[in-house]
Amino acid sequence: MTFGAIARESSRLTCVATSGGQTTMDFDWWMRNVPGYTKPHRDPRSYFGAVSVEERQRTVNEISALTLISEDDPPIFMRYRMPPEAPIPDDARLAGGWKIHHVVFGVWLKERMDELGIEAELNHPGVTSKYGSTAQFFIEKLSVAAAKVKQKAKRQRL
C-alpha cells in the first residue's frame, strides 16, 4: 500500500472497549444513579478548576460519552466487575472503587446506544456475552474491518 492509499483511509475508530468505564463526570448524575454514591469522592475543582457551576456542567457535557454519543459512533464492548444488583462492599476501600467504576455507567450508555442503533455489548458477572471477552470483541471487529480494507484495495487494483 502506498502513502497515498494510507492517507485516504479513515482515521475513525473501528471499535472501542472499556473496563469499568465512567461514561460521565457529572457528579450530580453519579449521586442520583450510582448506589451508595452520596458525595463527590474528589473536589470537582481538582478536575474542572475554580469555575462556575454552569461552566463545569458545560465541560462535563463536552467530555461525557452519555452526551456525546451519536449514530455514527463505533460499537463498544464494556466490561464491569459487578452486576447491577450487587450490594455495596463492606470494606470502605473496596466500596470506593466499586462506586466510581459501577456497572450503572455502562447500563446507561448501552441504553443510549441501543436507542441510536449502535452495538453496545455490556459484560458483567451473571451475563453471557456475545463475544466472551474484550480480546474476542477486538478480534471479530478488527478482522471484519481488515477484510473490508483488503476488498477495497483489491477493487482499486482492478
Image (cartoon, rainbow, N blue to C red):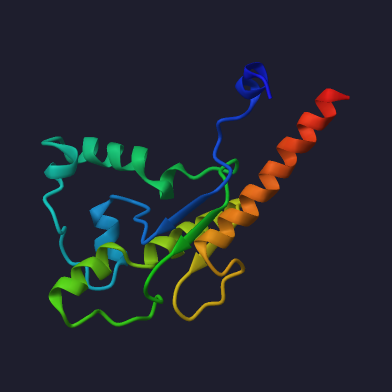
Q: Is residue 40 above or below residue 85?
A: above
In the rendered structure, the answer to whether residue 102 lies left or right of residue 46 reads: right
Q: Quadrant of residue 145?
A: top right
Determine the residue positioned at 30% across, 57% down: 29
In this rendering, does residue 33 appear at all?
yes
Q: Is residue 117 visible?
A: no
Residue 89 x %, y %: 23, 80
Give the residue drawn at x 34%, y 51%. Answer: 24
- Give the mark count: 0
- Say which quarter of the image contains residue 115: bottom right
Residue drawn at x 16%, y 58% is: 40
Left of 23 or right of it: where is 10? right
Residue 119 in which image quadrant: bottom right
Q: x, y (%) of residue 136?
A: 58, 61
Is 26 placed above or below 151 here? Answer: below
**Which quarter shows the N terminus?**
top right
73 lies above or below 157: below
Q: Is residue 97 left or right of residue 13?
A: left
Q: Nearer the viewer, residue 17 or 26?
A: 17
| Furthest residue toward front | 1
Q: Residue at x 37, y 75 (%)?
A: 82
Query: Residue 51 location, x and y as percent?
Result: 15, 35
Work out whether residue 60 or residue 17 is closer to the camera in this orientation and state it: 17
Q: Which of 41/9 is in front? A: 9
| Up/down of 77 relative to 53, above or below | below
Q: Residue furthest top?
A: 4
Residue 90 rendering spot, x and y as whole percentages: 18, 83
- Of 17 and 138, nearer the camera is 138
Quarter of the rendering occupied by the C terminus: top right
